[in-house]
Amino acid sequence: MPTSSDSGILLSPSIIASDLSTMGRDVSAFDPLAFDLLHLDVMDGNFVPNLTFGPGYIKSLKAHTAIPLDVHLMIESPELSVERYLELAPWCVTIHYESTKFPSRLLQLIRRSGVRAGLSVNPATPLEAIFDLCSECDLVLVMSVDPGFYGQPFMPASLDRIRRLREFLDGRPGGAATLIQVDGGISIKNIASVAAAGARVVVAGNAVFGAGDPNRAAFELKKAAQKG
């Protein structure tokens, strides 16, 4: 399992910004020193407007890489299908607080399967809404854009949310071990600020795959994060 790199973060490039039709071939060229994780945005066209892929695609992709998989379920009622993703033994499975009436039950189920349990919170949701659930999480994902709309700019208010969440986690027993992940609008210009605010897992899409060389772009992002 990956641990924090020299930059102090784990970089989780989001393949939604890549050419999904060739990812089975392309993923073999990703440097595991640059790609700590692979972020997989599962969208259902219901919880979010866009539609991406499901467990079948992820299973096929996993056969082509040893990079740990970071599965982000942007789907309505994840309790109906989460076990299909757990069968793939990813590094983490993250559900959205807003997507289910049973977040606590789901987080416990994910943990019992031996997979890290992640809980994502949208920009419009008060952080306080998830505080009682943080003890059941290994990771909290702070969305820095509205979910499901690829290519949005980073919301500056997210930095304060990250700082407040880090302060809350560090102030409770065992909370210091809970990772904060940030997803949305990450670039070489803001990654240091995101890391300084307390994020330790950073998702980047276009900043990695919009460049000619994804490995080089990933290394440059991690180098920039060191300033944070």
Image: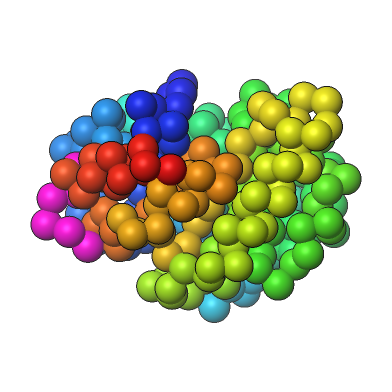
* Residue 61 rendering spot, x and y as whole percentages: 33, 42
- Which residue occupies the extreme right position in the image? 132
Q: Is residue 211 left or right of residue 66?
A: left
At horizontal 27% and vertical 35% (from top left) the residue drawn is 34
Q: How is the protein colored in the picture?
A: rainbow
- Which residue occupies the extreme left position in the image? 212
Using the image as rendered, state which of residue 109 and residue 134 is in the foreground: 134
- Which residue occupies the extreme bottom position in the image? 49
* Residue 22 rendering spot, x and y as whole percentages: 20, 54
**Quarter assignment of residue 139:** top right
At horizontal 50% and vertical 56% (from top left) the residue drawn is 183
Using the image as rendered, state which of residue 91 and residue 210 is in the foreground: 210
Instruction: Look at the image and tell me whether residue 25 can be seen.
Output: no
Q: Is residue 161 left or right of residue 128?
A: left
Q: Which SS does the magenta portion mostly show?
A: loop
At horizontal 75% and vertical 67% (from top left) the residue drawn is 125
Q: Is residue 107 left or right of residue 158?
A: right
Instruction: Look at the image and tell me whether residue 185 can be seen.
Output: yes
As displayed, is residue 125 above or below residue 168? below
Q: Which residues are magenta?
A: 210-215
Q: Is residue 16 magenta?
A: no
As displayed, is residue 11 above or below residue 182? above
As displayed, is residue 53 above or below residue 71? below
* Residue 105 rendering spot, x and y as whole percentages: 84, 42
